[in-house]
Amino acid sequence: MFPEKDSQKLEKQNLNCQENPSTTCFREYLRIRTVHPQPDYDGAIHFLERIAEELGLACQKVEVHPGRVITILTWEGTNPRLRSIVLSSHTDVVPVFEECWSHNPFAAYKDADGNIYARGAQDMKCVTIQYIEAIRRLKASGKRFPRTVHLTLVPDEEIGGHNGMALFIERPEFQNLNVGFALDEGLASPTDNFTVFYGERCPWWITVTCEGNPGHGSRFIENTAAEKLNKVITSFLDFRKKEKERLNLEPGLTLGDVTTVNLTKVNGGVSYNVIPSELTVTFDLRISPAVDLEKFEEQVKSWCQAAGEGVTYKFHQKCMDKNLTSTDESDPWWKAFSGPFREMNLTLQPEIFPAATDIRYFRAAGFPAIGFSPMNRTPILLHDHDEFLNEGVFLRGIDIYCRVIASLASVSTLPTEN
Ligand SMILES: CSCC[C@H](NC(C)=O)C(=O)O
Ligand SMILES: [Zn+2]
Ligand SMILES: [Zn+2]
């Protein structure tokens, strides 16, 4: 839609100024169309293999499902027996409504203010390149650290990770990584502070089926599916209202601290004048880790029972893992992660991630993991039109990762590692 305009501008930019090579690398990666529903994963893998060659990193590919490859780039530590640091990122991006963008979302156009527009600019191709550029810089300055650092580049996060990280975590190649601590994506923060995520809410996707008496659309049929559906929807949405009020009234709460309920689908009906014998409604719930999940399911059951006979529910997604990663100063991983921010006079704001990322697979397997994307003073634009990241913020993120990676990869031998 925009090819001529943006490619001409792009050419000019490349000719007129010497761009920071890290930015050039970022923009090159953004131009690879790893967009659903047919992501160019081969393009991403070729790019990553070339990076591995440039940086002198070992490169391993693990096909966990046909066409779904995890690429692992490894920088071996001086004491490879110690548990490793995993820097994880997904390679796929969500689709775009191209007509709603000011620039071609796959041209990585940079405007006069240094804002780089592209799908994946925030989610999360920036982070992948920031990891890479930080390692490039650390290696170039001759640094070595005791712990091995692995970059895992993972497909299909945007569609739930079921054929990506979920399978990888079960593989012997994952065991061989000898993981100690992992980093994965976070969110942009519009303020000066950096948000950092130590847990996630539990996604539950529930379809409720309501059965009732059918009949002619002109009559008062008793016990219809619609009356039951109405009761079910009211119960779920009343709860939604209470949680929304709690978020607005209780000071200090963020979205991750409350439970959201959203009606996402309603199905049923056969004809304008036939009362249907079955109607279904689907809800997307994101449950705060503070909630007792067994009790919550009892609540769902009672809402369905109260709606009448023949009301049943089934899960499409039911996360039962509420593992949180320690943000206590006595925790060696947190201390190593947060230390550099204190030194740089930057403020971290620990929160619960409101949605679900691949990091949940690390935490469910018992590994400490933090979600972090170094993007302060930036509007949250993941999955949105005109997703962009400012070049200055992007480059600052590389400085931050240089310190964070150095700190994590230098965590001294833990009692459990002797
Ligand atoms: C439960 S799998 C779906 C994953 C998706 N992740 C994001 C970040 O949008 C979500 O939270 O809906
Ligand atoms: Zn993401
Ligand atoms: Zn996403």
Image (tube, rainbow, N blue to C red):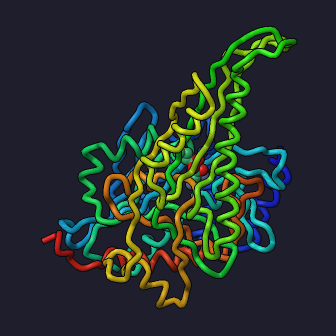
What percent of the width, then of the height, locates residue 335?
A: 37, 81
Front residue of 98/190: it is: 190
Front residue of 230/68: it is: 230
Front residue of 418/284: it is: 284
Q: Residue at x 77, y 53 (%)?
A: 385
Q: Which residue is drawn at 34% across and 79% down?
A: 143
Residue at the farthest top position: 216
Residue 144 falls in image quadrant: bottom left
Please state if 263 lies on the left or on the right of 339 as rendered.
right
What percent of the width, then of the height, locates residue 223?
A: 69, 20
Query: Where is the C terminus found, in terms of image quarters?
Result: bottom left
What percent of the width, then of the height, locates residue 41?
A: 52, 42
In the rendered image of this protein, does residue 362 appear above or below residue 223? below
Residue 127 falls in image quadrant: bottom right
Residue 35 falls in image quadrant: top right
Query: Where is the N terminus found, in terms of image quarters?
Result: top right
Q: Which residue is drawn at 73% across and 25% down?
A: 226
Q: Can residue 132 be seen in this view?
A: no
Q: Which residue is drawn at 57% across and 40% down?
A: 40
How many numbered discs?
Answer: 0
